[in-house]
Image (cartoon, helix red, strand yellow):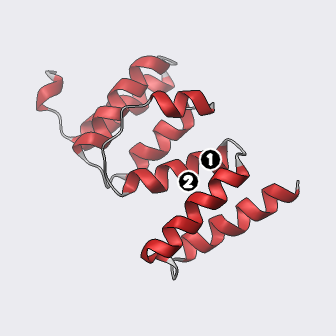
Amino acid sequence: ANRNNLDGYLLYLEGVVLKKLDLRSQAVTVLQSAVAAAPTLWAAWLELAGLANEYEALDSLQLPKHWMMYFFAAHAFVELKLSEQALEAYMALASAGFEKSTYVTAQIAIAHHDRRG
């Protein structure tokens, strides 16, 4: 299929298949296109986070300038056990209007817990 005709959801599915086939760099490219086409598709961001297994890899991603990117970065920091960065990112999200979010509160707790370990 011509990738230009695919929406973010189909790109996400293609990225999942490529990841399952262990075609990691192709999966990253397609998932980056998926989040650019459908920036609120959290599942695509999660798949992308699973492929960015080190801090440098996070930095090299081409991500849309969208508020979901901040949730993605914070989530990736937790996954990479970068507790200080995760805590800072989630505190910024809380002060940006998500202070009543149970998800953000739980992630702050996880980051605090990881700092102790």
Which residue is situated farthest in the bottom direction here? 100
Q: Which residue is mark 1?
A: 77
* Residue for point 41% across, 50% down: 69
Cβ–Cβ below 8 Å for labels 2 and 1?
yes
Q: Which mark is residue 40?
A: none
> In x, y percent, where is residue 25?
45, 18
Left or right of 38? Residue 15 is right
What kind of element bears circle 2?
helix
Left or right of 58? Residue 32 is left
The crowding category of the residue bearing disc 1, from other C-alpha atoms within 10 Å (few below 14, some 14 to 19, many at least 20), is many
> In x, y percent, where is residue 38?
25, 48
Q: Is residue 50 above or below residue 78?
A: above
Left or right of 24? Residue 63 is left
Residue situated in front as seen by the camera: 51 or 74:
74
Q: Report which quarter residue 6 is drawn in.
A: top left
* Residue for point 36% across, 33% down: 31
**Quadrant of the rendering where the N terminus is positioned:** top left
Q: Is residue 10 above or below residue 81?
A: above
Q: State how many labels appear.
A: 2
Q: Is residue 94 above or below residue 88?
A: below
* Residue for point 43% across, 45% down: 45
The CA distance from mark 2 to mark 1 is 5 Å
| Amino acid at pointer 2 | Ala
> In x, y percent, where is residue 82?
70, 46
> In x, y percent, where is residue 43?
42, 49
| Amino acid at pointer 1 | Phe
Left or right of 113? Residue 22 is left
Which residue is situated farthest in the right direction here? 117
What kind of element bears circle 1?
helix
Q: Which residue is mark 2?
A: 74
The crowding category of the residue bearing disc 2, from other C-alpha atoms within 10 Å (few below 14, some 14 to 19, many at least 20), is many
